[in-house]
Amino acid sequence: MLTPDFLGTRGDAQVADGKGSRTEILLHEHQREVWVRTDRLFAGLLVFEAFCCLFAGLFITPRTWIVATGLLHVHLYIAVPLSFLIAFLPVVLVLTQPGETLTRHVIAIAQACMSALLIHLTGGRIETHFHVFGSLAFLAFYRDWKVLVTASTVVALDHFLRGVYWPESVFGVISAGRYRWLEHTGWVVFEDIFLMQSCRQGVAEMRRIAERQDAAEDATRAKSAFLANMSHEIRTPMNGIMGMTGLALETELTEEQKGFLATAYGSAESLLTILDDILDFSKVEAGKLEIHPVPFHLREEVGDVLNAFSVRSAAKDIDLIFDVFPDVPDALNGDIARLRQILVNLVGNAIKFSVQGQIVVRVVVQSGVDQPLRLRFDVADSGRGIKEEEIGLIFRAFEQGDSSMTRRFGGTGLGLAISKQLIELMGGTITVESTFGVGSTFSFELPFTQAECLVEPGHHTKNFAGVKALLVDDNATNLRVLKRNLGTWGVEVVVAESSKEALQLLQGGECADISIVLTDVHMPDMDGFSLASEIRDFLPNIPVLPIASAIRPGDYEHCRAIGIARPLLKPVKDSVLRKALAELLGRKDIVGGTESVNDQMKRMPSDYYEILLVEDHEINQKFAERFLSKRGHRVTVVANGQEAVDAFKNSRFDVVLMDLQMPVLDGFAATQIIRGLPNGETTPIIAMTAHTMKGDREKCFEKGLDGYISKPVRPHELQAELLRVMQAKKD
Ligand code: ADP
C-alpha cells in the first residue's frame, strides 16, 4: 500500500505552519525549486504541443479521418482551437502561481487532455497512445506521485467515455470491446508503479541532501559561536597586555626600553588584527556581517590610511602615491570602516610583497554621467607579482600564493578572502592583474552616493591662481599626480626630475617669477634638504616645502636651521597641502580643510569626571583606572554588578563604565537596577565589552546603555566615547 509518507511528500503542511524541522524546511525549499522548474518546462511543452495539434489537424487529420468517414470531420474545427484552450489555463497558472499544488495538477490534467486530443486528431492511431506514456514520464519530473494519479485518472476516464460513445476517436475503430479502456488503463497503472517508485527515491534523496545541508549549517553555526567565544576570551587578556604596555610607554624609560615595549605593543596590535580577521571571516560566512554607510570625506580618509603606512613603506624605500582623479567627488556616503579595512589589506600586501619601487593607490570614477556613482580603486605595486597558477587561489580563504615552508612572508591567507567578501557585500567586484616578477594591480569597484550633508572641500577651486611652483621629484608618477592636483587649484607648475635640473631651472632665469619650491626629500645624487640649502644661497626668500616619505629624528631642527618649512609626510593629503601652501604663501583666506577624526580625538574632554568603573578582570581594572586617573578623572573601581549597585547607592557618579560579563550580577542587570535608583536615569552608562559580534552594540543601546566600547580598549576610543556621551548629556 502506497501511503503519502511512504511516497515521501509529507512535510508541506508541517512546513507551512512553521513547525517543521530545519531539514523539512530545506527539503521543502528544494522541492519548490523542482516544482517551479518543472512548471516552466511544461508551460513550454504545452504551447509546443498546441502547435503540433495545429499541424496534425491540418496535415494528418484529413487523411486519417477521411479514410474513416469519407469527409473532413466537423469536430476537427473545434479540436484545433481546443488545443490552445487546453494550454491556456496552465500557462497562466505557471506565470501567476509557479510551484503551487493547483498549478501542478492543472498541468497534469492539461497534459492528459493534450494526449487525448492528439490521439483524436490522428484518428485514434495506436502509436499516438505512446504520447500518454511520455507525458506520465515527464510528469514524474515533479517527484510528486499525486500528479501521476490525477493525470492517470483523466486518461482512464477519457478512454472509458470515448471508448463507449466514440470509439473511432480513441481506438480508431467503429466499435471497440467493452473493456478495452480497462486494458489501456492497466498499462498506464503499470507504468505509474515504476514512476511512483522513482518519485519516492527522488524525494528520499532530496531529504538526505537536506539533512546533510542542515548538518553542515549546524557545524558552521557552532564554529561561528566558538570563534565568537574565543575572540571574547582572547580579547580580555589582550586588553590587559595592550593597556599595561601603553601605560608603561607613558612612563620615563630609556630608549632601549621604549623600543622593547613599542615592539610588544605593535605585536599585540597585529595579533588583534588577525583576531579581527578571523572573526570577520566567520561573520561573513554566517551571513552576520552588515554594512553601515556613513558620510565621509574620501581624500581625507584614504589619505589617513596611506599615511599610516608611511613608516613601513619608507623602511623599504617604496614611494607610496595617492592619485585621486579630480572628477571624483569627495563627500560620499559609504561604509568607510570597511573601505579602510580593504585598503589596509591591499596596501599592506603591496608593501609586504615589494622590495622597493612604488605603490600607487588610484581612485577614478567608473560610472557614466547619469548613472549611479561607482568608483574604482586600484592598488598597483611593482613587487614580486603573482604566478599565473596562484591567481585563482589567492581570493580563497586560508590560501596563500606561496604556502611552502620556505616562504618569506607571513600571513593568514584570510585578508584577500575577507576583502573580496566585503566588496561583494557592498555591491562591488574585485579583480587582479599581475605579472610575476613585475608587479600586481588589485582593482575593486564600489557603489557610493554623494553625501549631501557634508560640504565638498574645494579641491577643484582655483584659489591659488597666479601662483607658480617648481616641483622637484625623481619619481615621474609623483610629479604627474602633484602637478595635476596643483593645476586644479590654479597653480602653474614647472617640473624638475632631479635637484640638478631644479638648480639649472632656477639659476637659468626660467623660474624668475617662481613663488614656491616643492621638493621630494629622498632623491639620488642630491637630496631635498641639500637642494634647499643651495636654493637658500641665491633665493633667500622663496618658500621651500620639503615632502618626505618618513620624518626622521632631527628633521624638523634641520629644516629650521636651513630656513625652510617643516617637511610634509608622503602621500600628502590635499587638505594638508592646501593648508601648507596657504600658510607659506600668506593666504589667510584659504581654510585648511576638514577636521579629521584624528583631530577630533585630540580634543580632550575639558571636565574631570567622577567615574564608576565596573570590571571583574584585575589587569583591566588597573589599566582603565590608571589611564583615567592620569587624565585627571576620579575613579572608583568595583568588581561586579552588585558592587556597582551598592556603590551607586552610596555615592554620586558622573558616568559609569560597565563591563557586561561579570560574576554575581551582570552588566545589563546592574544597569537596569541603577536606572531605578535616584540619579540613575540621568547618569550615562557606557558598556565596555569584549562582545564584538553583530548586534552586540545595538543590544547595549536597546538595554538602556548610552555608550559602547569594545575591548581591548584603545585609549583614543575610550576618550572619544567619553567625550561623545558626556557631550550628549550636556546637549
Ligand atoms: P596573507 O597576506 O595573510 O597571506 P592574503 O589573503 O592577504 O593573505 O593574500 C593571499 C596571498 O596572495 C598571499 O599569500 C600572496 O601570495 C598573494 N598576494 C596578495 N597580494 C599580493 C601582492 N600585492 N603581490 C604579490 N602577491 C600577493
Image (spheres, rainbow, N blue to C red):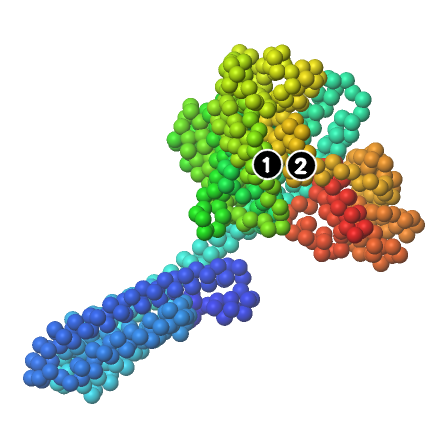
Q: What amino acid is found at the position of numbered circle 2 in the picture?
A: Asp
Q: Is residue 192 left or right of residue 563?
A: left
Q: Pointer 2 and pointer 1: residues touching (CB < 8 Å)?
A: yes
Q: Residue at x 43, y 29 (%)?
A: 386
The residue identified by callout 2 is 589
Question: Mark 1: is the Cβ under 8 angstroms from ligand 1?
Answer: no
Percent across and percent down for residue 538 are 61, 12
Q: What amino acid is found at the position of numbered circle 1 in the picture?
A: Asn
Percent across and percent down for residue 80 are 20, 78
In this view of the protein, which residue sits in the foreground, 215 or 483?
483
Q: Do we see residue 580 in this rendering?
A: no
Q: Residue at x 72, y 38 (%)?
A: 601
Dividing the picture into quarters, in which one does residue 31 lie?
bottom left
In this view of the protein, which residue sits in the foreground, 124 or 414?
414
The residue lying furthest to the right in this view is 650
Quadrant for the N terminus in the image: bottom left
Q: Residue at x 37, y 69 (%)?
A: 95
Disc 2 crowd, CA 10 A, few/some/many (<14, 14-19, 20+): few
- Looking at the picture, does residue 195 appear above or below residue 567? below
Q: Is residue 11 left or right of residue 142?
A: right
Q: How many marks?
A: 2
Percent across and percent down for residue 625 are 83, 37
Real-space CA distance between mark 2 and mark 1, rounded to the nearest whole angstrom: 9 Å
Dividing the picture into quarters, in which one does residue 70 lie?
bottom left
Percent across and percent down for residue 517 are 58, 22
Q: Do we see residue 381 in this rendering?
A: yes
In this view of the protein, which residue sits in the foreground, 442 or 544?
544
- What secondary structure is found at the residue carrying circle 2? loop
